[in-house]
Image (cartoon, rainbow, N blue to C red):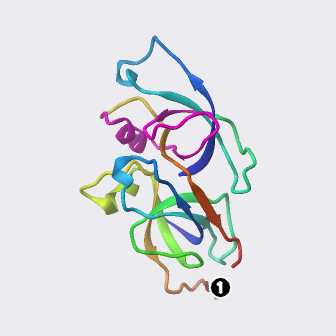
Amino acid sequence: MLIGRVVGTVVATQKNEKLEGAKLLLVQPLALDGQPRGTAVLAIDSAGAGVGERVLLVQEGRAAGEALGKKAAAVDAAIVGIVDTVDYRDEP
Amino acid sequence: MQLARVVGDVVSTMKDANFAGIPLLVVQPIDASGAPIGRPLVALDSVGAGVGEHVFFVKGKEASFPFHPTEPPSDASIIGIVDHWDVEPSGAEG
C-alpha cells in the first residue's frame, strides 16, 4: 500500500455496472516526506475520504475488489484507510 | 516475497472494516546486502514486527491470506521476521 493525498473527485454517470454506487477519487501518491511521486491515480473509496486528506492506497485488483465488496469488479485501485499519523524513522 | 526493513508505523482510525486490529507498518525493501532498493510502502503486519526489524513480506492478492478467513483489502503483508541471512560469496548479513 502507498500513502497518497486525495486531490480531486470524479463523477461518472455512464460506467461499468459493477462500479455503480462507488465513490471515485483522484489520489496523488506521496513519498514519505510528503512530496508528490508519480502520476495521480483514480481509486474507489471505501473509507469515506475527502479532498485534501492523506489516505492508504492499494493498487492491486483483488484487494480493490474486496474494498468495493464485489467479486470480479473491474477496479485496480482503492482507498482503504484515512491516515491519522505516520511515524517514520530512517536510521538503520 | 521480498526482504525489507521496518522503518515506521501508520495510524489510521477511519479504515476498511476488515483492517480492524491489524497493525500497519512502513517497510523499506532491501537487497541481499541490506541496502535499500525502491520506494518504501505500507504493509499489514501478521507476525508482530516492530520498527528496526528485518522482515519479509508478500505482495499481491496473496497479501490477504495470512488473515484468513478475514479478507483485508491489502496488497502487501509482512509474513515473517528475519533472524539472520547469509549471502555467498560476500557473506553480507543483516
Horizontally, residue B71 falls left or right of residue A5, namely left
User: Between residues B47 and B58, which one lies in front from this camera angle?
Assistant: B47
Where, quadrant-wise, is the C terminus of chain A in this rendering?
A: bottom right
Residue B11 percent location from the top left of the image: 52, 59
Number of dots carrying numbers: 1
Horizontally, residue B68 falls left or right of residue B27, namely left
Q: Residue furthest left?
A: B69
Q: Which residue is mark 1?
A: B92
Please, what is the three-letter code of the amino acid marked with disc 1? Answer: Ala
Q: Is residue B45 above or below residue A20?
A: below
Within 10 Å of disc 1 (Cα), the crowding (few <14, some 14-19, many 20+) is few
Residue B3 percent location from the top left of the image: 55, 71
Q: Is residue B49 above or below residue A1?
A: below
Q: Give the letter of the chain under mark 1.
A: B
Residue placed at 38% from the left, 40% from the top?
A67
Residue placed at 38% from the left, 54% from the top?
B19
Residue placed at 46% from the left, 78% from the top?
B81
Query: Is residue A64 covered in magenta?
Result: yes
The magenta stretch is A41-70
Horizontally, residue B17 falls left or right of residue B93, namely left
| Quadrant of the image occupied by residue A17 | top left
Q: Is residue B92 above or below residue A57?
A: below
Residue B18 percent location from the top left of the image: 34, 51
SS class of the residue under badge 1? loop
Q: Residue furthest top?
A: A14
Horizontally, residue A32 falls left or right of residue B24, namely right
Query: Is residue A66 covered in magenta?
Result: yes
